[in-house]
Image (tube, helix red, strand yellow):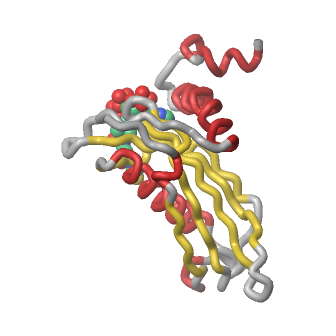
């Protein structure tokens, strides 16, 4: 299996916020944004693995800024690390000012996807080789975040989270 770079899975989705997608304050509904982020991450995971992929966990989402109706929103995602069958995907979201075109970061998230076969069983994915400084930083922290996610999901015991524990020693 040939190793890939994060840029091979780069996915950029740009779309508007329409009235049916908002909350009572006329800002984008959180669940709608999560769905858009999930879609972008799913495409990134498919591009990296070239397999069927499923969302295993949403490890982190920060709703930093409200997104008013009519905004043009861009969602950018990339695989930051690949393990055996799972992939961590970073997703950044920004809106652009209608008049100036200035970009404002509104949201970021970290998702885990798993590549599966047609019966839903996990399958192996290609390794990833980070290139930029940011990609290397995200790659380095990914095992720690995977252990935290597995710990919260009750899938490993605290003593197995060695990388995570090392943070506190
Ligand atoms: C995700 C899924 C395939 C994992 O299956 P599983 O039987 O737990 O398989 P495994 O224990 O072998 O885990 C497979 C990989 O997922 C990772 N994983 C599982 N749960 C995880 C979690 N909560 N956080 C991070 N990684 C997780 C495992 O660490 C493993 O990674 P690795 O192979 O890279 O080491 C399975 O739970 C599933 O199909 N879930 C439903 C997915 C879905 O329908 N998503 C859409 C929801 S609407």
The residue lying furthest to the bottom in this view is 99
On the picture, is 129 further left or further right than 136? left
Ligand 1 resides in the quarter of the picture at top left
Image quadrant where one finds the N terminus: top left
Count of residue discs: 0
Residue appearing at x 39%, y 53% in the figure: 47
Q: Quadrant of residue 32?
A: bottom right
The residue lying furthest to the left in this view is 119
Residue appearing at x 54%, y 14% in the figure: 160
On the picture, is 73 further left or further right than 106? left
Residue appearing at x 62%, y 19% in the figure: 163
Q: Nearer the viewer, residue 78 or 118?
A: 78
Let me know if residue 57 appears in the view. no
On the picture, is 120 further left or further right than 41? left
On the picture, is 128 further left or further right than 53? right
Residue 20 x %, y %: 55, 83
Residue 106 x %, y %: 72, 64
Residue appearing at x 62%, y 51% in the figure: 109
Q: Nearer the viewer, residue 129 or 141?
A: 129
Residue 70 x %, y %: 65, 85
Q: Quadrant of residue 131?
A: top right
Looking at the picture, does residue 95 appear above or below residue 107? Answer: below
Q: Quadrant of residue 96?
A: bottom right
Q: Nearer the viewer, residue 8 or 91?
A: 8
Let me know if residue 156 appears in the view. yes
Image quadrant where one finds the C terminus: top right
Residue 66 x %, y %: 74, 69
Looking at the picture, does residue 66 appear above or below residue 17? Answer: above
């Amino acid at each position: 299996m040939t190793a890939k770079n994060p840029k091979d899975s780069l996915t950029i989705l740009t779309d508007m916020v329409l009235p049916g997608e908002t909350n009572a304050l006329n800002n984008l509904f959180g669940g709608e944004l999560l769905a858009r982020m999930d879609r972008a991450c799913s495409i990134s995971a498919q591009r990296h693995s070239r397999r069927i992929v499923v969302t295993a966990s949403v490890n982190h989402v920060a709703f930093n800024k409200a997104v008013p109706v009519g905004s043009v929103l861009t969602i950018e995602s990339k695989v930051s690390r690949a393990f055996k069958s799972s992939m961590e995907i970073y997703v950044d979201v920004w809106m652009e000012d209608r008049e100036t075109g200035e970009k404002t970061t509104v949201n970021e998230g970290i998702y885990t996807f798993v590549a599966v076969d047609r019966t839903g069983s996990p399958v192996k994915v290609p390794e990833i080789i980070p290139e930029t400084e940011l990609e290397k930083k995200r790659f380095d922290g990914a095992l720690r975040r995977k252990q935290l996610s597995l710990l919260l999901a009750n899938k490993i015991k605290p003593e197995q989270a060695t990388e995570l524990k090392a943070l506190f020693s």
